[in-house]
Amino acid sequence: MKLTEILGIEHPIIVAPMFLISNVDMVVAACENGATAAFPALNYRTDQELREAIALIRAKTSKPFGVNLIVNKSNPKAAQQLETLLELKVNFIITSLGSPQEVIERCRPLGIKVFCDVTSIEYAQKVEKLGADAVIAVSSRAGGHCGPEAPETLITSLVKNISIPVIAAGGIATKAHVDEVLAWGACGVSVGTVFLASKEATISDDYRQALIDYGEKDIVLTTKMSGSHLTVINTPYVQSIGTKATFMEKLMKRNKWLKKYLKMFIFIKGMRAIENAASKATYKTVWCAGPSIEYIKSIRPLKEILKDLTT
């Protein structure tokens, strides 16, 4: 089944949920121009703010949209956020970094679709058995948290080994890219990096300029910010702190008991640094982006960027 059929949308495109970047205006612009979008629940500090954001989106569009939910120990707000999303009956939930079992079981009776981020066949098969409606194949070319497999390898192997729809994520910036992954068997795409350069995105002027000035060769992989692989722009600050695992990260990998606590600490500490860099001028510039940054030449309205993916 195609993503257009699953969600009742014109274009098989999700404007991907981006930590601290996705906002009401981006979601509405995507929905009103034939696609859909999701935002991270963690972009809102309180339950009231999360509720207000959903209400505002619904006041501006009647089209379907979703919310990304971090479902592992790094998100202490997960339980409350899930309750709110269930109560307000959002159209779909994207789960990341943990087991989606409770989310799937509780969404199914309400008709809320659940798409699960996956980076491997093994995990995709697990979420299929749990009842996920689709998987999002997070490849090595994804911006932010990424997987180890190249897009074609991951997508084609998932299509062969699971029976639920596969949504492609990573390295998508043009209609040719969309057509290519659909030909590999994907039902739709989740696109993030190129939408960082939308006028609706609330990021600092320095971040905006970096998106234009840097290219694919400037994207590096780091584990310092969240404990998981993260693609960022190789700014002088990133170069100064390095990208290799710290002592704590190495300890975390060796000790299962410490893992969940240390990962939570690394995630919160790293995300605070990213928040500061995204929202204000700072010499500690840790800016998330994927290789698709190569296609960013200017800051444009979201609907124009979306047009590049559809015509």
Image (cartoon, helix red, strand yellow):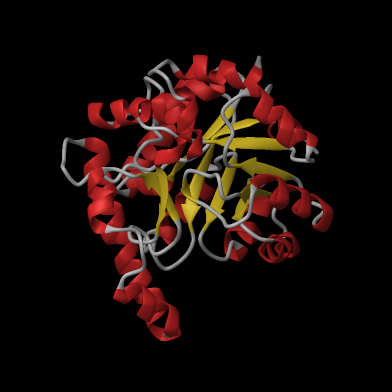
Q: Residue extending furthest front?
A: 217
- Residue at the (44%, 26%) spot, across then down: 26
- Residue at the (34%, 27%) spot, across then down: 213
Q: Is residue 182 visible?
A: yes
- Residue at the (31%, 70%) spot, across then down: 246
Q: Is residue 58 visible?
A: no
Q: Nearer the viewer, residue 111 or 244?
A: 244
Residue 21: quarter of image: top left
Q: Nearer the viewer, residue 73 or 205?
A: 205
Residue 70 is situated, as x and y percent measured from the top left of the image, at 46, 56
Q: Is residue 281 left or right of residue 215?
A: left
Q: Is residue 260 left or right of residue 12?
A: left
Residue 281 is situated, as x and y percent measured from the top left of the image, at 16, 35
Q: Nearer the viewer, residue 86 or 63?
A: 63
Quarter of the image with the N terminus in it: top right
Residue 34 is situated, as x and y percent measured from the top left of the image, at 62, 20
- Is 45 situated above or below 176? below
Q: Nearer the viewer, residue 89 or 250?
A: 250
Residue 220 is situated, as x and y percent measured from the top left of the image, at 41, 49
Residue 4: quarter of image: top right
Quarter of the image with the C terminus in it: top right
